[in-house]
Image: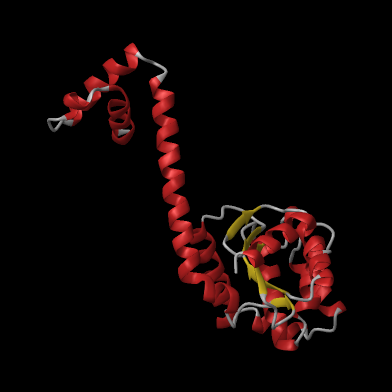
Amino acid sequence: MRKLLATVLVTLLPFGAMAQPLSDEDIKALALEAIRENPQIIMEAIALLEEQRSEAQAVAQADTLLRQRAFLEADPNAPFVGNPDAGTVIVEFFDYNCPYCKRAAADVKALIAADDDVRVVYREWPILGEGSVLASRAALAARNQGKYEEMHWGLMEMRGRAEEASILALARSIGLDVEQLRVDMQSDEVNSHIAASDQLAQNLGFTGTPAFVIGDALVPGAIPLAELQQYIAEARAAE
């Protein structure tokens, strides 16, 4: 609130009026007087603060992307699909119980089929409840039996929410040793991947799933295949 009142004063008052340090009470009194005389200024001040906040967030996100790009694109504890030697890397943050992620999955699969120079790195980010956590753990644990991709697509194509019973039924249907899977779901590798995904998502300013990193672009939400391809074209042009 103090910042908002100060912004009101900076917006309204002449420079000379701000030349001397002001106490909190001075700021409140001057700001209230200014608002009474010009009530529309409160909306202008809020808009200015939002603009400043957005600019600061964009700078922080760009800095995070610069510092974390190598880890995002080549974390050995992150599964991927597509060409392992691809020149273009997409990073996707997702949740198996997110309907928008399920919608995006079909476009990601089509993208991989159409472009052999793309690798999609997956960041399992289970944020929609215990079923989502179990699904991510099961998919990551399936790596130890060489079946991550089958588990991933199976969960993405599953009808209804992924819960313990449906997750384990899928695991059995694709030939996983379920007892071993249960053990592997609690491994350090699984814990580390999920924790890293959460921290990366927060640092990049993502607030929901799906979310993509494509080149220098941070793309929240599900986007159709044509837009994915456009972002890829822009990333390649910037190289």
Q: In which quarter of the view is residue 155 placed? A: bottom right
Q: Find residue 221 and report its horizontal and vertical position in percent.
A: 67, 52
In the depicted structure, whether residue 229 falls above or below residue 123: above
Residue at x 36% of width, y 14% of height: 38
Up the image or down, 27 lies above or below 191; here it is above
**For residue 150, what is the image quadrant?**
bottom right
The N terminus: image quadrant: top left
Decide if residue 26 is in sight here. yes
Q: Residue at image x 45%, y 32%? A: 47
Q: Quadrant of the C terminus?
A: bottom right
Residue 149: where, in percent of width, then height? 77, 77
Frontmost residue, 94 versus 12: 12
Left/right placement of residue 17 relative to residue 168 reads left
Residue found at the very far right of the displayed protein: 173
Expressed as whole percent of the image width and height from the top left, the position of residue 89 reads 65, 72
Residue at position x 13%, y 33% from top? 21
Identify the image quadrant of residue 74.
bottom right
Relative vertical location of residue 108 with respect to residue 12 in this rendering, above or below: below
